[in-house]
Amino acid sequence: MNAAGLVRKWRSRYKESILLKRLLAVLSVDILVKISGILLLPVYLRLMTQEEYGLYNYILSIIITISIVLNFGLYIPLSKFYHDDTDPVKRGELLFTVSTLLLAILTILLLPVYLFHWDYSIIHFLFRNPIDYESYRVGILLAMVMTVMNFMLTNFFYATEKIRKLQQYNIARIITINIACIISLFLLRGTGSVRVRLITTYLAEFILFLLFSIFFIRESGRKFNRALAGSGLRLALPIMISALFGIVINFSDKFFLEKYGSFTRLSYYYLASSCASVIPLIFASFQNAWLPLFLKEKDIRRNIARTNKLLLRIFAVFAILSLFIIIFLKIVLTLGIIQPKYEQTLYVLPLILVSQIFSAMVPLYSNYLIYFEKTYITSVTGLILCGVSLGLSLLLIPTFGVYGAATVSLLCNLTYLVLYYFIIRSYTKKFLINETTPAGE
């Protein structure tokens, strides 16, 4: 086939593929987000000291990790139930019920923590190195709430297939947050760059959330459905429990690195993680585009075939991408675009990249647990991984520092992938056997 024929074939497949259209629409913006983040890294590294960069990212890790729990898994019933009914009234009830549940539980949980100053005990546990928490307290609360709200709004755009609105939202966030942060850090140098960047980022997020949440409000109903709330909580609860385990699994490497090291060591680890974060970012876009289509497909054999193809393609694409990321970091360090003091990042980066590839492949299997409504399995696997993560962290990080932390992340994600492979293989095999066995036999 000649080149023109290949182009025509690709265009034909693109026009027919809902997944490809949706993925390219979202991915184009997400790539812009990540490219802007990588290009601006040298700017932020020069506007912040190495210790401040390490501290800021450690605080950000805490915020993101806790926020995953604080969405209480309610994005799952939103994605699952939205396509079960085409009636706009029923869909409006779903949106109102989920959002009301989220706000109520969030208020009940966070209000006493901050009123009775229990958050000080949490910070004392999370930090060995001294920090001026009082100056970050308001910023951290704002950041946690906005991270949860942004996640749910983004999930709403995906579930309702408002991809154009999602693009506009993400582009607005890229431009507004980066401009506001760079100007604030430059003008307020010497006044605590961690606090300045934290508050500026999430004030900008808050303003943009208010502007774009109008699309959610327009579609939301005004009736709380108790039955729907009960079904949603039953589906979401195992995901929330899994997220609790995820605190240990995803955060233990940073936690022990801070306990046995310094914010300077953390800066190497976080710079490598920032470079590698292009992989989970791209995959998250793919997953958000893929999951609604996966759940809508009623032919399990077709889903299995498509998943197997996707696993191979994702591994190949991310392996090639990882090589380019390593080369890119080497070039910017050699040219002095990023200061030589961050050179140790280059040696830990390959481990983190491999870890992120394994991590990206896991949701393609865990999607089946939502499909079969067996989300409780995530709690069981989460408990197993908690033990693995804690054991490896205590064994490797005190001795090997950032290399130990990267190895812990890699081994945990590999274990996750292997566990889900065998679990889903067993479930799909049983499902296919039951499907082909006549009733009564």
Image (cartoon, rainbow, N blue to C red):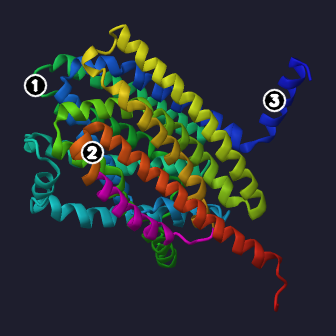
Label 3, label 1: how far apart the Cα atoms are: 54 Å
Amino acid at the residue labelled 2: Lys
Which one is earlier in the sequence, the residue at label 1 or at label 2? 1
Q: In the rendered structure, does residue 383 fall within the stretch colored magenta? A: yes
Query: Which quarter of the figure has residue 300?
Result: bottom right
Residue at the spot of label 2: 254
Q: Quadrant of the N terminus?
A: top right
- Could you tell me residue 355's position as x and y percent? 46, 43
Q: Which mark is residue 72?
A: none
Picture layout, residue 239 above or below residue 54:
below
On the picture, is 435 further left or further right than 374? right
Where disc 2 sits, the SS reads helix
Which one is earlier in the sequence, the residue at label 3 or at label 1? 3
Q: Nearer the viewer, mark 3 or mark 2?
A: 2
Q: Quadrant of the C terminus?
A: bottom right
- Could you tell me residue 250's position as x and y percent? 36, 51
Residue at the spot of label 1: 191
Where disc 3 sits, the SS reads helix
Q: Nearer the viewer, mark 1 or mark 2?
A: 2
Which residue reaches farthest right?
1
Query: Which quarter of the figure has residue 241?
Result: bottom left
Magenta stretch bounds: 372-393
- The residue lying at 28 percent from left, 14 percent from top is 339
